[in-house]
Image (tube, rainbow, N blue to C red):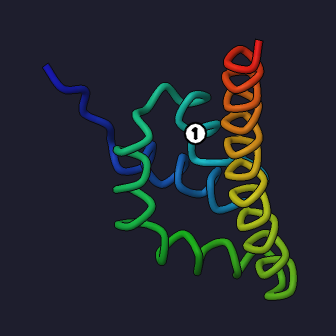
Amino acid sequence: MATRYNENFKIEVVKAYMAGDRSISEIAADYNVAKSTLTGWVKKHGEECQYKTTTKTSQEKFESAKEIRRLNQLLHEKDKEIDFLKKAAAFFAKEID
């Protein structure tokens, strides 16, 4: 049976993601929610949470949080690329021997 989450919980999780200091994977793990579920919540509630966040902070802080989130996502992608290249290097090193 699928787990049902109340709207307040969904909004809390989306706000945690919108803060910008953690990736979707990290937030999903912290709240024990599937990444795909969290992605859907962000699409559904993101704009609503964005406005609530900006009323608490200045627009400049919001833009900074958005940039941090973008950079964290880019860093995560680069980490995945590095892991792939390490595996490829190990594979080719074996082939040479």
Q: Position of residue 29 (x, y in %)?
A: 57, 28
Residue at image coords 86%, 77%: 61
Q: Position of residue 77 (x, y in %)?
A: 67, 52
The image quadrant where one finds the N terminus is: top left
Q: Position of residue 31 (x, y in %)?
A: 54, 30
Residue at image mark 1: 25
Is residue 26 depicted above or below 16 in this figure?
above
Query: In the image, is 25 to the left or to the right of 43?
Result: right
User: How many marks are shown on the rendered structure?
Assistant: 1
Q: Residue furthest front?
A: 96
Quadrant assignment, res 92: top right
Residue at image coords 39%, 67%: 43
Is residue 51 depicted above or below 3 in this figure?
below
Q: Residue furthest left?
A: 1
Q: Residue furthest bottom?
A: 59
Q: Position of residue 10 (x, y in %)?
A: 42, 48
For this rendering, which residue is in front, 55 or 65? 65
For this rendering, which residue is in front, 59 or 97? 97
Q: Amino acid at mark 1?
A: Ser
Residue at image coords 60%, 74%: 52
Secondary structure beneath disc 1? helix
Query: In the image, is 51 to the left or to the right of 63?
Result: left
The image quadrant where one finds the C terminus is: top right
Mark 1: few, some, or many residues within 10 Å (few <14, many ≥20)? some
Query: In the image, is 54 to the left or to the right of 57?
Result: left
